[in-house]
Structures are given as C-alpha cells and as structure tokens.
Amino acid sequence: MGSGFQKTNLYHFSPERVEELNDMYLKVRGENSTQDFFYLFFNRFGLQCHEFFQFCKLGNHVLNCCNITVPTYTIRRGRCFRTKTLYQESFDELGKLRLQMKAPAQMDKKLPTTRQLISFIGEQKPEMAPFPRYYIYPNLWNKMRVSAEEISLFPAAEICSEEPVSKATCYLEKWLVDSVEEPFSCTYPYMQEYRNVSLESCDPITLAMNYSLTIQSNNYLAHNCLLPCYRWEYSVALERTDIKLIDPQANLSSLPYQFRIDVSYNDLQYESITEVATTTFFGLLSQIGGQLSLFLGSSILNLVQSFIMIFILTSRSLRRSSRRQVEPVETPLPQVMSIDSQIKPKENGYTVADEYYGIRL
C-alpha cells in the first residue's frame, strides 16, 4: 500500500495502525532512502524468477527463464517480469514462445484469494502500464495470437508527440502528475527508472493516508493524450482450452505448473502505416485555390486567367519588339541633268550658255 500498489484491504489499516506501522518502517529502513529501501526489500522478499517460472521455450530452443526475463514494476500492480528482446523465427505454432509458471506463494493464507495471473502485451520499452491486460487462469492452455502494427507519422503538435513512450504510459503519466506528483510533490519509488523526474520518492505513510486518491483513483482514462508519432500497436486474440480436454488422463495436481501461455505471430509479417508527403497537380491547385479563396477573396480560376493574360501580353510585346527594325534614312545622290545648250558667242570673247547644269536635291 505504501509503495503505490493497489488491491489492499483497507479494513485492516486504521489511521492508528498506519502510524504504528510507519514507526516500525522507519526503524527498519534506518539510513537508507525510501527508494533504496524499496529495491532492497523487493529484491530480497519480493517475487523471484526461480519461484515463478517453471519452463520456457522459444521455437525448438529450451531457454533459461531467468535469462530472458527481468523484474520490473507495473504501476499500481506490483512486481512483474518482462521478457527481453526475443525474435520469432518460424511462423505460428512452430516459433511460439511457451511459458509455464507456478502459482506464486500466498502471503496470508487466511485471506480468500482468486488464483489468476495478469499478462500485458506492449512495446519493448522499460515502462509497463496496467492496460491492455489479459487474465490467465490455472489449468488452462492460454494461446495468444499477436498481430503487430507499426505507425510512423509526421511530427505535429496537434496530432502526435515525439516523446518515446508507450500508448498506455502516455495516458498514465498524466494521471500520475495530477493524482500524486502535483498534490504531494513526490512520486512512486520505481518511477525513477522510467521517467526523467527530479521528485523524491513518496514516504509510505503519505501514500497510505491518501490511498483513495494516490492509488485507487481510476480516472486516468479521462485524460487527453497525444500518442507518439512513432509507435507499435499490438492486437491479441486470446484462446483458452482446458488441459483436461487435451489430455483427459492428466493429473492436474501433479503437474509442475499451473499456468501456461503460448505467444506467437500467425506469420512473420507486420502491418506498416507510414505518413508520406505526396500531392498531385490538381491537389496542389485545389490547396492553393482554397488558401487564396480564404485569404484573398479570389479563386483558382481567377488566378489561372491572370497568368494566361500576363503570358499573352508578354508574348505580344516580345514579338513586336523583335519585328521592329530601325529603317535607314536614304540620302539621295545628286542627280545631274544633262541639258542641251547652245553656246552663243558673246561679245568680248565670252560665251554664255542659254541653259546650265542644274543640281536637284
């Protein structure tokens, strides 16, 4: 309860009892910080890999379960185990991941329990969010058929976010800020692994005294969230089959495990959705026309007509200037006119022509 995990029966914890337990906690914690003591406690007394997994197999390869899983903490759920990066090499049943698990030890045998496990399917990222979740029941063969979808969008403030978080974590972070971090100026002890946050870990008594607000509140679905621009989304088809139907002679009490999960892709393919920048000529005209109509009060037809008129007028002007030549000024040569003249003798030896050479310009 004081570590941020839900499903705690509050009838066993009155305010006086919480104060008493907090005094004991402070003595046991000693000089350790809240975060250090959290990991120290769960690494020693929490659920361990060898206590939980019984058998693991990928395709035809038998694996050491503790080598392919790492402990992690699911917000409000508790300590879980997350698989490392694994690759399916054959399609469907031939390449499936098979996990067989034992029933975890019961902390208080006096309390009624419901034997079930919760499985989460999500992106290969450190954080684990509590949805989508799938309930696994004992003595059933649980088959998960997974299909993957890769989504890559252009970054846009109103469409998606560039933060590398999973889809569920995107919603959950907003809930965490509103319910825990802003009101109490602290956060869950294990949040340092998943988020770049400078807040200190909340003291257990702070979370315990405000349990209904800091842990049990379920209003995180009401928050708006911009999903990452690049993300993977998974769809799961869950099938359950009674083990007795497969092997009627099986003695369930003698089986070394109680839970079995088979996870696989039907085929070795995934769907990719990528946003690309493409446009057609008419689409471009439509976009330009829409913008001009919106801001200038004109249409694309007016714009086309204007371009055509400018082109025609420019062409005419160029043709006229090319045809126009400077005509040379013709300077006429002097025209000599020959005129018959009769030279008549004059007095004193001079002669005078009745006609003369004339020059006409």
Image (spheres, rainbow, N blue to C red):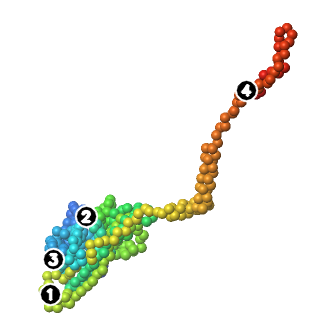
Quarter of the image for residue 82 reads bottom left
Quarter of the image for residue 349 reads top right
**Label annotation for residue 253:** 1
Mark 1 against mark 2, which lies toward the viewer?
Answer: 1
N-term mark: 2 or 3: 2
Residue drawn at x 24%, y 86% is 241
The alpha-carbon separation of the residues under discs 4 and 1 comes to 139 Å
N-term mark: 4 or 1: 1
Residue drawn at x 41%, y 63% is 276
| Amino acid type of the residue that numbered disc 2 sits on in the rendered structure | Gln
| Numbered disc 4: secondary structure | loop
Query: 122 or 168, which lies in front?
Result: 122
Query: 16 or 57, which lies in front?
Result: 57
Residue drawn at x 60%, y 56% is 308
Q: Which residue is mark 2?
A: 35
Q: Is residue 292 above or below residue 348?
A: below
Identify the image quadrant of the C terminus.
Answer: top right
Mark 3 against mark 4, which lies toward the viewer?
Answer: 4
Residue drawn at x 29%, y 74% is 121
N-term mark: 3 or 1: 3
N-term mark: 3 or 4: 3
Taking the image as drawn, is residue 44 in sight? no
The answer to whether mark 3 and mark 4 are in CB contact below 8 A is no
| Numbered disc 3: secondary structure | strand
| Numbered disc 1: secondary structure | helix
Residue 199 rendering spot, x and y as whole percentages:
32, 61
Q: Is residue 45 left or right of residue 304?
A: left
| Amino acid type of the residue that numbered disc 4 sits on in the rendered structure | Pro
The alpha-carbon separation of the residues under discs 1 and 2 comes to 40 Å
Residue 260 rendering spot, x and y as whole percentages:
20, 80
The alpha-carbon separation of the residues under discs 3 and 1 comes to 17 Å
**Label annotation for residue 334:** 4
